[in-house]
Image (spheres, grey):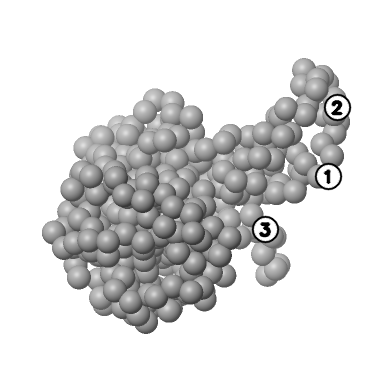
Amino acid sequence: MYFVKSTRKANIAIVGATGQVGKIMRSILEEVVVAGLLPVNNVRFFASAKSAGKSHNFNHKRIVVEDLSKANLEGIDIAIFSAGGNVSLEYAPKFAKAGAIVIDNSSAWRKDPDVPLVVAEVNPEDCSTEFIKKGIIANPNCTTMAAMPVLKVLHDNASMSRLIVSTYQAVSGAGVAGIHELTRQTYSTKSPLELTVDGGINDVPSEMQVKFKRPIAFNVVPYAGDIVNDGSLETDEEQKLRDESRKILHIPELLVSGTCVRVPVFSGHGLSINAEFERDITPEIAIKLLSDSANKESIIVDEIPTPRLAAGKNPSFVGRIRADQSAPKNKGLSMFIANDNLRKGAALNALQIAGIVNSKY
């Protein structure tokens, strides 16, 4: 995996260590520590009072989970948050004031002009003190994250000007509750073959339809996130895709149109992308650029990339690369990208940022 090695032994905290992403973060952190990629002096786990007092194995030690509301924050070098936006808004400034660099997984700080939004392989230079004015670095939305390593390579070569994206987002992006909702609905459908002729067969009871606006089992729901109250009729997921792409790639005028769709897949987001460029680029050139990228561990060109192929793996898988016939000749590409929304989309990128930060401070 892509990782900036450092020699300083850091004191690292994971806030939200017992949640869905927190568990994966603990596992990956142990991987990189054992591999010598991120030297640590001390590791601390924080969570709510409900989870405090429990202990978890980490590198042959038992670490007791601390109550976030009562914790002593002194001596922490890097704090990685994966506990939701409200927790981040309240506690990230407190950790930063106590001397830590905070890496936040929520959407709480992404739009803040004084908080860099970073994909480790794409814009690591934004982790410099020039940009970290509040002691906080934001981790992008997992959907945006999947596309960034690929689009960065293509943009550097041909200068991207427009994106049209349809996403195929796994239910794990809606948390553990999303996974349970798909599971319950799938097993409660008594006659799935009858759905061939009647979509109302075995209608889903209201108590089984909470996280998603329509039944998710055996279905596709073109409504991921929540409608933003600004008259645009877009969801917040669709606006994140546009705003975050512009900020990460440093293309403030990039035209982006997105439709975010929830699909009955447990893990792994897919993106169908039409990208338009100012300079000429062909599928052959794009494939060679991506195959020869300096970040080979972050990008894999595959003929048919799928969420199932990506689940449990680090890279963005990209394929179906072809000319966009709706764009001027040699100015557009169509492609499909798949990436694990929990692994790279949240946990791994945050730890890669930690490695960058640890090498700089």
Residue at horizontal 38 percent and vertical 75 percent from the top = 73
Q: Give the residue type that dot 2 points to.
A: Ile
Residue position marked by numbered label 3 in the rendering: 226
Note whether 328 is above or below 161 in the view shown. Answer: above
Residue ID for mark 2: 201
Image coordinates of residue 23 in percent, x first then y, are 45, 48
Residue 166 visible, this orientation? no
Q: Residues within 10 Å of mark 1 (few under 14, many from 20)?
A: few
Quarter-of-image position of residue 204: top right
Amino acid type, callout 3: Asp
What's the residue at 60%, 49% (across, down)? 174
Distance, label 3 to label 1, CA atoms, is 19 Å
User: What label sits on residue 206 in the rendered view?
Assistant: 1
Quarter where residue 226 is shown? bottom right
Distance (Cα) linking label 2 and label 1:
15 Å
Element type where label 3 sits in the image: loop
Q: Secondary structure at mark 2?
A: loop
Q: Earlier in the sequence, mark 2 or mark 1?
A: 2
**Depth check: 329 or 254 in front?**
254
Q: Residue furthest bottom?
A: 97
Real-space Cα separation, disc 2 to disc 3, in angstroms = 27 Å
The 10 Å Cα crowd at callout 2, few under 14, some 14 to 19, many 20 or more, is some
Q: Which quadrant, please, contains the C terminus?
A: bottom left
**Circle nearer the N terminus (2, 3):** 2
CA neighbours of label 3 inside 10 A, class few (<14), some (14 to 19), many (20+): few
256 lies left or right of 124: right
For the point 33% across and 77% down, the residue is: 74
Residue 66 x, y percent position in the rendering? 45, 64
Q: Is residue 69 visible?
A: yes
Seen from the viewer's position, the closer of residues 318 and 211 is 211
